C-alpha cells in the first residue's frame, strides 16, 4: 500500500490530476487483460473499507441517482407506508414498464444530514452493491470505475493502487 487514503475534500483535485494516467492505464489493462485483475481489485476492496467510512462521505447518494428495480419497490413502499404505485410516482422516474427506474431527485431523498440512509435496511440492491469493486469481471467495469473515481474516494484509491501493482507491466 503506497497511496495515501484521500480526504474527500481533496478528491476533485486528485481526480483531475490522475484521470489522464488512468485513461492510459485502463487502455493498457483492456489490451492485456491480466488474469489476476479481479483478485487484486478484490483484495484492495477488502482493505479500503478499513480506512474510508461511507458515513463521512455520502457522495454517491448525493451525486449518482440510484438504480431502482421492481423488486426493490415493495420493501421501500412498505417502509414508507405507501402503495407500490404511489412510491414509484413520488420517488422514481424512468421506465416503470421495464422496472428500470432511478430516484427522481439528487441528493437521494433518503440521504439524511448525518449521511445515514433513512431506508438502509430496504435500500435498493444497486445501493448495497455500490461501488462494485468486489464485482466479478472488473475488466468490464473499468469505464464505470473511471467515472466513479470522481465521486468515490475508495474507487479513486483502488485505481491508484492498481497502477502501483501493475506499474511495470501496464503503465
Ligand atoms: S437509498 Fe440510501 S443508500 Fe441508496 S442512494 Fe438513497 S440514501 Fe444512498
Ligand atoms: S462515494 Fe464511496 S466512500 Fe462515499 S459513501 Fe459512496 S461508496 Fe462510500
Image (tube, helix red, strand yellow):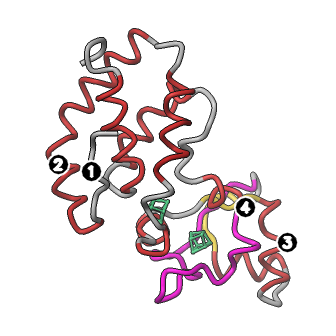
Label 2, secondary structure: give it. Answer: helix
The disc label shown at residue 16, or none: 2
Front position among marks 1 and 2: 1
Front position among marks 1 and 4: 1
Which numbered disc flags the more N-terminal residue, 1 or 4?
1
Answer few, some or many: residues within 10 Å of disc 1's Cα (few below 14, many 20 plus, some between 14 and 19): few
The answer to which quarter of the image holds residue 31 is top left
Q: Which residues are magenta?
A: 99-124
Residue for badge 3: 74
How much space separates mark 1 and mark 2, taking CA atoms? 16 Å
How much space separates mark 3 and mark 1, taking CA atoms? 41 Å
Are the residues flagged by discs 1 and 4 in contact, CB closer than 8 Å? Answer: no
Which numbered disc flags the more N-terminal residue, 1 or 2?
1
User: Which of 30/162 is in front?
Assistant: 162
**Magenta stretch: dominant secondary structure:** loop
Residue for badge 4: 96
Amino acid at each position: 500500500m503506497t497511496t495515501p487514503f484521500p480526504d474527500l475534500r481533496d478528491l476533485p483535485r486528485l481526480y483531475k490530476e490522475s484521470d489522464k494516467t488512468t485513461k492510459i492505464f485502463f487502455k493498457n489493462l483492456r489490451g492485456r487483460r491480466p488474469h489476476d485483475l479481479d483478485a487484486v481489485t478484490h483484495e484492495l476492496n477488502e482493505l479500503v473499507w478499513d480506512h474510508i467510512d461511507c458515513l463521512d462521505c455520502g457522495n454517491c447518494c448525493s451525486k449518482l441517482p440510484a438504480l431502482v428495480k421492481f423488486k426493490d419497490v415493495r420493501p421501500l413502499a412498505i417502509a414508507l407506508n405507501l402503495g407500490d404505485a404511489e412510491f414509484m410516482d413520488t420517488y422514481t422516474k424512468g421506465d416503470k414498464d421495464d422496472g428500470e427506474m432511478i430516484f427522481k431527485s439528487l441528493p437521494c431523498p433518503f440521504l439524511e444530514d448525518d449521511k445515514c440512509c433513512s431506508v438502509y435496511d430496504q435500500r435498493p440492491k444497486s445501493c448495497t452493491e455500490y461501488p462494485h469493486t468486489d464485482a466479478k469481471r472488473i475488466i468490464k467495469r473499468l469505464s464505470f470505475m473511471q467515472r466513479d473515481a470522481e465521486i468515490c474516494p475508495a474507487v479513486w484509491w483502488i485505481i491508484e493502487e492498481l497502477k502501483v501493482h501493475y506499474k511495470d507491466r501496464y503503465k
